[in-house]
Image (cartoon, rainbow, N blue to C red):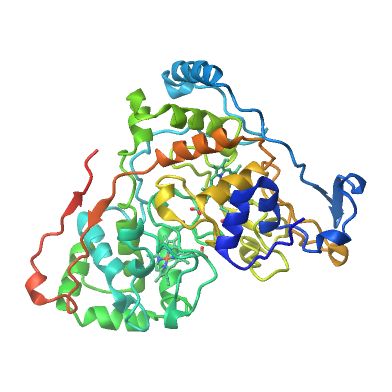
Amino acid sequence: MLRIPRHTAATLTLLAALSITAALPAADTATEPAEKKPAESERPNVVFAAGRAIERPKRLAPRPERSAEERQSWIAELRALYSQSPDKWPTPHVDEGVEWRELGLLPEVVHPESNPFSQAKADLGKMLFFDPRLSGSGQIACASCHDPDLAWADGRVNAFGHDRFKLHRNAPTIVNTAYYDVLFWDGRAGSLEEQAHAVILNPLEMNATEEVVVERLNAEPEYRAAFANAFCDETITLDRVAQALATFERTIVTTGRSRFDAFLRGKHEALSDEALAGLDLYRREARCMNCHHGPNFSDSKLHNLGLSYYGRKYEDLGQYQVTKLAEDVGRFRTPTLRNIVATRPYMHNGLFELEGVLNMYNAGMGTLLPKEHQLDDPLFPIKSPHLKPLRLNKQDLSDLRAFLETLSEPRLRIRPPYLPGLSPASEAPAKEAETSDSPT
Ligand code: HEC
Ligand code: HEC
């Protein structure tokens, strides 16, 4: 048996990639050395923590691979099934009570009545998003951690905040955040406006105050004019800054240029055989539709995947920090899977690569079992019942990945905007252009 070190993402991912069982200790499992444990057969199947039953994970062998002929006829069957309109696709494997929605093309973004769209407001929001003067130090812009060249994330395990403070969570992409009901990994913000407010004032992130931001922006006549264009007068407030940022963010969405979107529009050859088999796995055997459903591949709800690292170095109690409810310990909001290959590394702690994530789902995710002193602990985290060992074989895992790859869109090159008082004056009249560097 392996004693699993838990300190580097590389180790975790490597172990997860090596075998399904090795992926279990990488997440929430008991930490005692293997030799102290009774033999597998002597252990009870169910363990209790504060009266709540926790099922010990079963280690199941992968299902047998299909022969080449079997696979060929299976793919032909799937082609026929999935060439129909989505309402005729096979029923997905979701558990009772899950209000799932079919995958599909994203609808137009709805801007809230309290902050209606205008192009002037979105343009102002774009300037503010790239402007480091929104941070106390004058050094960090939203775009420092949500960089358009890195799929609007930062490519790092954890983001660096004020004074290069290492934040304990991974910076998610802002793409398609317009479609979530709640924001942040732990769901603590109910709107993009609220979210922008929070990050500007957070001492660990942008560490600014309303006075500092307003004073700096007010000093620039062009900013005053831009606020006057976006709102009815040139008054600058943190509320208006947040509104403009949110309006801009609602324009940063995927626009139906992925292979899967082409497939949904009836171009059925857009999915390879592998990706098609992956789509079917995603909707059925792999059970992903229990949570990543609907056009944005997210139910906007919070779940415990067994990644709370309860009582350990990487502990993050997720939604519990917001609600203080025992059942919310370790719950995080389901992220979108659109553009997923571009937004590595993954999960709220950024500790995983895609291969590791898929191996962990295949194992049903790690199950944290209570230690002696935790048997009466009412906060002991309980993993979502939607996660079960899947028995996917190597071919299945590679098909599933092939499907996820079809959710990528060709990148838009975003030119950073002109910033009054910071950009050279010669750039002032520059027209912002967004060009696609690989046409679909
Ligand atoms: C220092 C790096 C950093 C900066 C600067 C930063 N963010 Fe973030 N952002 C993060 C991290 C980390 C998270 C996740 C935090 C969490 O969930 O607890 C996040 C989360 C978000 C989310 C929620 C995404 C989701 O999926 O729910 C949005 C939207 C967002 N940021 C927008 C902004 C805006 C707008 C600004 C500028 C006002 C900004 N961020 C500045 C690091 C940063
Ligand atoms: C019980 C609900 C649930 C199910 C079922 C589920 N997921 Fe997730 N998924 C989540 C949540 C919640 C997170 C974020 C967890 C965290 O950060 O701790 C997540 C994260 C991910 C991530 C990382 C995304 C990122 O941006 O970091 C990927 C990739 C992913 N899931 C793919 C899948 C696939 C593929 C399946 C099916 C095999 C699946 N998920 C099944 C809820 C679920």
Which residue sits at x=32%, y=74%?
237
Q: Quadrant of residue 348?
A: bottom right
Q: Quadrant of residue 315?
A: bottom right
Q: Position of residue 56 (x, y in %)?
A: 80, 47
Q: Is residue 67 left or right of residue 254?
A: right
Which residue sits at x=86%, y=44%?
45
Q: Is residue 387 left or right of residue 55?
A: left
Q: Ligand 1 lies in which image quarter?
A: bottom left
- The answer to whether residue 73 is above or below residue 40 is above
Q: Position of residue 143 (x, y in %)?
A: 33, 67
Which residue sits at x=39%, y=80%?
208
Q: Is residue 27 visible?
A: no
- The answer to whether residue 63 is above or below residue 419 is above
- The answer to whether residue 349 is above or below residue 251 is below
Q: Among all residues in the image, which is located at the extreme right?
A: 42
Query: So how many labels did they put on this image?
Result: 0
Residue closer to the observer: 298 or 339: 339
Position of the C terminus, as image quadrant, is top left
Position of the N terminus, as image quadrant, is bottom right
Q: Is residue 277 visible?
A: yes
Which residue sits at x=50%, y=34%?
399
Q: Quadrant of residue 191?
A: bottom left
Residue closer to the observer: 163 or 191: 163
Q: Position of residue 69 (x, y in %)?
A: 53, 17
Q: Position of residue 151 (x, y in %)?
A: 35, 55
- The answer to whether residue 62 is above or below residue 88 is below
Residue closer to the observer: 184 or 234: 184
